[in-house]
């Protein structure tokens, strides 16, 4: 009886900590115990929307059946793509950590841009064509110019979201992932400098939204090679996740698969071809992303 109870507890924990991965040739799967269980082949989950609909009907027996019957692969052996293959919108929050605002003022990389409160600066859009997964890596252009890393918590929208109040905002969230917002420094518009191919890295998977995952209590860390560059908690955001969803949805209708990048903390710094960026977030996993010359 004790063993049966332990199995049930483990299955319920797996449901609440479900990780949806997009791997190999846009197959969707679940990550459990360092294995990937293929939903595309076993459950005919062919699109991100299929995956969201499938996840709504999850239960312990369903998960047990997937683990016993779905084709599986070692996580280390698969190509990991962006959890959302083609987001309709990538909405990004600038200057959302106070310490980052101060470092931008002092490190000479503002290039005349006015650094203000995020509510005055507003949000901005990144091209969806800039989105890649960790296996694709970063193809750096304009090597003569400084290009910086920025680690961020990313919010993936799960259902149509328009003029949502912050009290209800988390009910519109499908899940969360890590993001790398790669940025060329310069005088051009922010969206222009951040929308190059491969300059939005999402991954390694989408961790399903659940009551035990507090988006304002996630530790973020980024190393370049072995050097620690960024380390902070999402507690330090100026605008919280629910406030960002309320703000963004007052301007745009957010659709399933749209992504909100919530801003980067202090510690941004330059990258060069040959570097490897090691990003991790508590409850979100970790990913190592290589930089190469385009």
Image: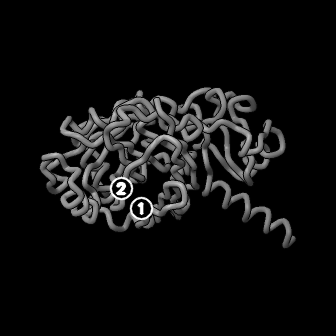
Query: Considering depth in this image, is 111 or 74 the residue closer to the camera?
Result: 111
- Number of the label disc, if any, that sits on residue 269: none
Query: Considering depth in this image, is 255 or 31 the residue closer to the camera?
Result: 31
Image side of residue 263 versus residue 108, left or right? right
Residue 138 shows in the view: yes
The residue located at (61%, 57%) in the rendering is: 16
Image side of residue 125 versus residue 230, left or right? left
Up-down relation of residue 229 to residue 244 (above or below): below
Tell me residue 238's x, y (percent).
26, 62
Tell me residue 50's x, y (percent).
58, 31
Tell me residue 47's x, y (percent).
57, 28
Up-down relation of residue 118 to residue 157 (above or below): below
The residue located at (50%, 49%) in the rendering is: 177
Earlier sequence position, callout 2 versus callout 1: 1
Say few, some or many: other residues with alpha carbon within 10 Å of mark 2 (under 14 / 14 to 19 / 20 or more).
many
Tell me residue 97's x, y (percent).
29, 61
- Number of the label disc, if any, that sits on residue 230: 1
Say few, some or many: other residues with alpha carbon within 10 Å of mark 1 (under 14 / 14 to 19 / 20 or more).
many
As drawn, the residue found furthest toward the front would be 144
The residue located at (73%, 62%) in the rendering is: 10
As drawn, the residue found furthest toward the bottom would be 2
Q: Quadrant of residue 30?
A: top right
| Secondary structure of residue under mark 2 | loop
The colour style of the image is one colour
Up-down relation of residue 115 to residue 40 (above or below): below
Q: How far apart are marks 2 and 1 (CA)?
A: 7 Å
- The reply to whether discs 2 and 1 touch (Cβ–Cβ < 8 Å) is yes
| Secondary structure of residue under mark 1 | strand
Q: Quadrant of residue 56?
A: top right
Residue 53 shows in the view: no
Write down the residue under mark 2: 268
The residue located at (68%, 47%) in the rendering is: 31
């Amino acid at each position: 009886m004790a063993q049966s109870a332990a199995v049930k507890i483990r299955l319920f924990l797996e449901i609440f900590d479900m990780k949806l991965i997009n791997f190999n040739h846009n197959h969707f799967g679940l990550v459990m115990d360092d294995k990937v269980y293929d939903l595309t082949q076993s459950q005919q989950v062919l699109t991100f929307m299929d995956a969201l609909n499938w996840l709504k009907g999850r239960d312990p027996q369903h998960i047990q059946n997937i683990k016993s019957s779905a084709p599986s692969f070692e996580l280390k052996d698969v190509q990991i793509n962006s959890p959302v293959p083609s987001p309709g919108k990538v909405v990004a929050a600038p200057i959302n950590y106070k310490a980052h605002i101060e470092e931008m003022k002092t490190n000479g990389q503002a290039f005349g841009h006015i650094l203000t409160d995020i509510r005055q600066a507003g949000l901005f859009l990144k091209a969806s064509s800039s989105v890649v997964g960790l296996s694709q890596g970063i193809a750096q252009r304009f090597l003569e110019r400084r290009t910086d890393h920025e680690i961020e918590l990313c919010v993936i929208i799960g259902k149509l979201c328009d003029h949502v109040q912050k009290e209800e905002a988390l009910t519109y969230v499908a899940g969360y992932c890590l993001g790398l917002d790669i940025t060329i420094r310069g005088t051009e518009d922010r969206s222009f400098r951040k929308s190059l191919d491969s300059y939005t890295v999402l991954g390694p998977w989408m961790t399903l939204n659940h009551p035990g995952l507090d988006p304002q209590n996630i530790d973020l860390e980024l190393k370049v090679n072995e050097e620690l560059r960024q380390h902070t908690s999402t507690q330090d955001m100026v605008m919280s996740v629910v406030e960002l969803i309320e703000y963004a949805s007052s301007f745009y209708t957010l659709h399933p698969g749209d992504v909100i990048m919530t801003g980067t903390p202090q510690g941004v710094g330059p990258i060069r071809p040959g570097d490897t960026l090691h990003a991790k977030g508590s409850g979100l996993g970790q990913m190592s992303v290589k930089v190469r010359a385009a």
